[in-house]
Image (cartoon, coloured by chain):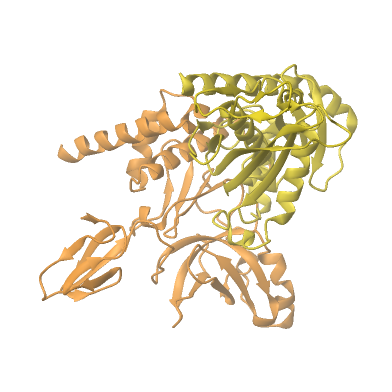
Chain colours: A yellow, B orange
Amino acid sequence: MAEVKLSEGEKCYLIHGINDNFRIDGRSCWDRREIDLEINLLPSCVGSAQIRSVNCSVIAGVKMSLVPPDPGRPGKGKIEFFADISANADPLFEGRGGQGIVVELVSFFEDSYKDCSLLDCLTVVEGKSVWCLSIDILILEIGSKASLYDLCSIAVKAALYDTRLPKVYVNPDTMDIEIPDDPFDIMRLDISQIPVFVTVTRIGNSYIIDPTQEEEASSISSLLFSVNNCGTLLHSKKLGLGSLHCDPIKELIPKISVVALELHDFIEDQCKSLTS
Amino acid sequence: MLCLPGDTVTEDADYMRGHGTYYKSKVLTSSVAGCIDKVNKLLSVRPLRTRYNGEIGDIVVGRVIDVQTEHKRWRIDTSSRLDTILLLSSVNLPGGELRRKTVEDELMMKSFFKEGDLISAEVQSIFADGALSVHTRNLKYGKLGQGVLLRVSPSLVERRKTHFHNLPCGVHLILGNNGYIWISLPVSEGVESGGFAINLDPVPLADREVISRVRNCILALAKQKMMLHSTSINTCYEISQSYQVKDLIKSKIMTEIAQLTNEKMKIEELQ
């Protein structure tokens, strides 16, 4: 995803096109490119998903372990995020090269999932042991940074849909935990509340979603929102350096909710059709 | 003929080993995926996925990545293995003025081409290490204005008589030998300025649609590894008319129009 530098003419052409609501690949401002989703592909994980969209590819995998809960939150499970950018995406990311993006990504995930209702159903024995889900995000290819966030959130949500946790039985007298031998005795997670991310990028005087690299190179900055299945904004963050005025953003919010709801529906439909 | 890595190119011991091949127990074997090239007794395999190998006289589209005033040259990215060089002595100055080799020119270098600018140029010479040197001493070449750049594999663009096309659908196309393709509005004959006068007025929506359609058609052809030339692009453009521009980035439709183009061109060849 090496930084693209655009000439004045290209930038001018691109920005005028967005003002006309016609982008260089023919999409309008609020159109997304095709997304290809696959689930249940890693046998070593309890849940996994891969997502591809043109030149971006992300794999998410979920692993679990039983741990004691945080002292302040005895009835809540834990979710840990790890991310890694493959040096195949760009030689720039070799070694610790991708650390900057990774830290930003992981912290946004942690903030968005902090109060998720999913954590409540991960309790095994209150105050004693809970499930800890470790979610690995492996980024194989990067198109634009803005659309990377959206795709990662879809991959994680799909991987959690695919997650099969073994049903745990607790002996009420001794409080011992028993894990059944039957591999089909599993429970699934309720993923409806899990947020997805929507990034809007400001180019010229308009906002667009799912920018290409060229579009990102001519943007002022991007705004990242995490939105739950009711269309409520949970968390937001600005990517990039430019400064934005708050009034147009307020007008954007209903549109962002609509886009997010479409994504929620997309994930559900895809996952259902993939499992059936 | 296409071959894969490890495929036998020939068992005949008379042939010489060229690029992309090696001997495996005295049998000439391919080391890359590509098509076999035969020049007299020399067999080589030209890879499909490759960086650009320049030849003198090629027309390329490139992006300026660096202005090196102290060396009196620009560094250009043309997707070749080494950065291409454009010397100050091989450009036309604005207005056709001849260069007087003064210090002023050197200091003005950034006002001719600056970082990020796109240029079209011709390969002038190749250095011993394989790096290319290009020139823009013709009003056809020079800085590119408003339009869209596409990157495809260099092996999809054949060397032809002409690489500048004005397509009947009303766009100007530069098929760079290096796999960089520039799509813009046509410039009327005789007013070429070597790119020093750039028009930054908004392009009308109707023209934009045509440019985007051509762009998406080229991407569809490139995805199916079909050769890019004015005929294939025109044919694909006509076939694509049954779809909206924004639908042409869907992989199903891309495959469909590329296959239809392929069939139509085969039929035309037979006639």
Rendered location of residue A102, percent (x, y): 71, 50
Judged left or right of residue B40, residue A112 is right
Q: Position of residue A97 (x, y in %)?
A: 68, 60
Name the residue at 81% across, 40% down: A238
Q: How many marks?
A: 0
How far from the left and from the top, in percent, is residue A113?
Answer: 76, 32
Left or right: where B83 falls relative to B106: left
Above or below for B133 versus A243: below
Residue positioned 45% across, 18% down in the render = A276
The answer to whether residue B96 is left or right of residue A123 is left
Whether residue A202 can be seen here: no
Q: Looking at the rendering, which quadrant does residue A125 occupy?
A: top right
Q: Nearer the viewer, residue A173 or B268?
A: A173
Q: Position of residue A262 (x, y in %)?
A: 64, 20
| Residue B123 sits in quarter | bottom left
What residue occupies the far top of the structure in this picture? A230
Q: Quadrant of the N terminus of chain B?
A: bottom left
Q: Toward the viewer: A120 or A135?
A: A120
| Quadrant where the image shows the C terminus of chain B | top left
Q: Is residue A74 visible?
A: yes
Q: Residue furthest front?
A: A173
Q: Is residue A50 above or below residue A275?
A: below
x 40%, y 43%: residue:
B223
Camera-nearest residue between B245 and B38: B38
A158 or A177, nearer to the observer? A177
Above-or-below relation of B216 to B106: above
